[in-house]
Amino acid sequence: MTDVLDEGPFFHGTIVDLRVGDLLTAGYRSNYRPEVVMNHIYFTALVDGAGLAAEIAADLSGGGAVPRVYAVEPTGTFENDPNVTDKKFPGNPTRSYRSSAPIRVIGEITNWTRLTPEALQVWRERLTALRSDERGEIIN
């Protein structure tokens, strides 16, 4: 795995209504593979990447959920996300990270590039294909 490239700021996308100071922890089911309980909490240095994750989570929830993006800070060590780093892309162009330690909410972000309905449909199709493909396995 490559060295960690960022010192922040970092962002996390979700559908959960959080407050400044809240801690996000591992141990919850994956939005993408609900049968998998995650050993890490994921975050990115790209606000639009967190927005994408939030919008996908809202879509997968079955409707009515509000996508939210938070500025976060790691409370412990973190590493490049191996689910995208070098497995699919050389280096870490998505600037995605994960930690087994909690991450702390330091603010809410309300301005990110929203997905068009067409782009959201493309992501639905990608996720459906990934679920049926062994290569879509989560490195946990």
Image (spheres, grey):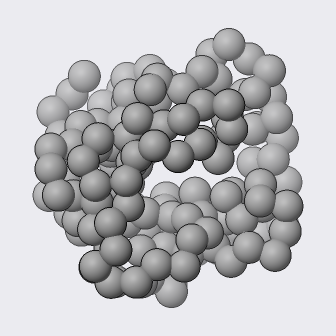
Residue 92 found in image quarter: top left
- Indicate the quadrant containing the N terminus: top left, top right, bottom left or bottom right: top left
Give the answer, above or below, for where 40 lies relative to 121. Answer: above
Residue 108 found in image quarter: bottom left
Q: Residue furthest top?
A: 134
Residue occupying the point 32% across, 66% down: 23
Residue occupying the point 33% across, 84% down: 20
Residue occupying the point 68% across, 13% down: 134
Q: Is residue 89 visible?
A: no
Question: Where residue 97 sits: x, y (%)?
Answer: 32, 45
* Nearest to the observer: residue 33 or residue 52: 33
Q: Is residue 18 visible?
A: yes
Question: Where residue 32 sits: x, y (%)?
Answer: 66, 40
* Nearest to the observer: residue 130 or residue 37: 37
Question: Where residue 84 sits: x, y (%)?
Answer: 45, 32
* Nearest to the observer: residue 99 or residue 23: 23
93 relative to 50 in the view: left or right = left
Question: Where residue 117 sits: x, y (%)?
Answer: 84, 67
* Nearest to the observer: residue 25 or residue 7: 25
Give the answer, above or below, for where 37 lies relative to 114. Answer: above
Residue occupying the point 51% across, 64% down: 13
Give the answer, above or below, for where 106 lies relative to 100. Answer: below
